[in-house]
Image (cartoon, rainbow, N blue to C red):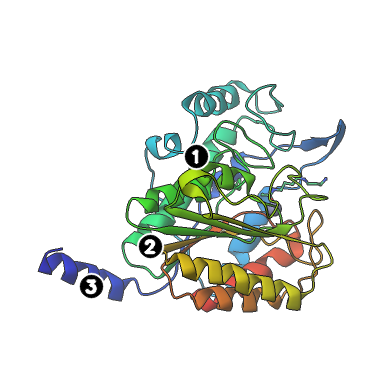
Amino acid sequence: MGNHRLLASYALRVLENKMQIFYTSEHSQHNPPEEIYDGVHSNYAETPDRIETIVRTLRENNYTTQEPQKFGIEHIEAVHQKQYIDFVSTRSAKLAADETLFPSYFMSDTYAPLVHGTFDAAKAAVDTALSGAQAVLDGTPAAYSLCRPPGHHAMHHAMGGYCYFNNAAIAAHFLSQHGRIAILDIDYHHGNGTQEVFYDRADVLYVSLHADPSDAYPYASGFSEENGRGEGLNATVNFPLKKSTTPEQYLKVLQEALFAVRTFSPDYLVISAGFDTFIDDPIGGLNLPAPSYKTIGSEIHKLALPTLIIQEGGYNISALGQLSSNFIKAFS
Ligand code: Q9C
Ligand code: ZN
């Protein structure tokens, strides 16, 4: 690196020596009326007011947000099958404003229906994630991308679990062109999509703490025996947790997860931040009270790595703003 590039990157670091938050209202175009579980229809839990309440609380706490930049589709194609991306794009565009489609293909479950605005919102969520990644590459110590719809259940060629494009995986792949990446997934649910994307890779570590898939979504993955494959062997680490897990037990397991991250010695950290581990979450819920998120944030912050925080799940609308503010406190 030449001297003035060094100087320029140092100047940027000084100028942007604070957390940047990325948000766009485009997510609200995605608002399905219902989800289906074993044929039973119920209200869609992944609602636009999730992100709106987070943004409102952050602004009340004097944080400012930035609009994401637009990135090319090639970043999505680096992680997802082209036919799948085209399917999400063309099928959402064809739907009328009041129509909902549960397709027969490209779905891993009935928790991710298409509506007219799905593709545009999901594309904007990817742009939000990539804008955070770019800010981290430019030297900001931490970026928080308020992605919606969430992403960590989105597979190479299937939507599922409220997810369409895997925001964290796309951003992690983008960052991986500049160094070694660790992804720490603290959503209540195992990030089956993210695990699948990086299962064979040695340069991206995936570590997840989540409710035991023996009796929690996504049921079919997230067991401790899943450790990666081929060159990726040992670059996937799963910590399934009992639903009765206490804050003390959770923090002990988090230390093991952080040890795995440190041992990998990454250049960048991506956090899949789901707040559905909150004790009063309507669809998840370990026994974590709101103050635990301050501790979790500050323990992760001690890694002292350039960090991209990607919003995943969290469904208690009245608590979400507080949980998010608590979590990012150490980074800001
Ligand atoms: N009947 C995320 O948190 N199952 N997705 C809910 C309620 C679907 C969660 C069970 C869970 C999907 C990003
Ligand atoms: Zn979740």
Which amino acid is tagged 3? Ala
Q: Do the residues labelled 3 and 1 touch (CB within 8 Å)?
A: no
Q: Mark 2 points at which residue?
A: 136
Q: Earlier in the sequence, mark 2 or mark 3?
A: 3
Which amino acid is tagged 1? Lys
Residue 248 drawn at (x, y percent): 74, 78
The residue most toward the left is: 3
The image shows residue 293, relative to residue 178, as above or below, that is: below
Residue 120 drawn at (x, y percent): 52, 36
* Helix, strand or loop for disc 2: helix
Q: Which of 23 and 291 is in front in this view?
A: 291
Q: Name the residue under label 3.
A: 11
Q: Name the residue under label 1.
A: 123
Which amino acid is tagged 2? Val
- Real-space Cα distance between discs 1 and 2? 20 Å
Q: Nearer the viewer, residue 176 or 308?
A: 176
| Marks 2, 3: nearer the viewer | 2
The image shows residue 89, relative to residue 135, as above or below, that is: above
Q: Nearer the viewer, residue 50 or 60?
A: 50
Look at 62% across and 27% down and name the residue there.
Answer: 106
Look at 66% across and 73% down and name the residue there.
Answer: 293
Callout 3 crowding tier (Cα within 10 Å): few <14, some 14–19, many ≥20: few
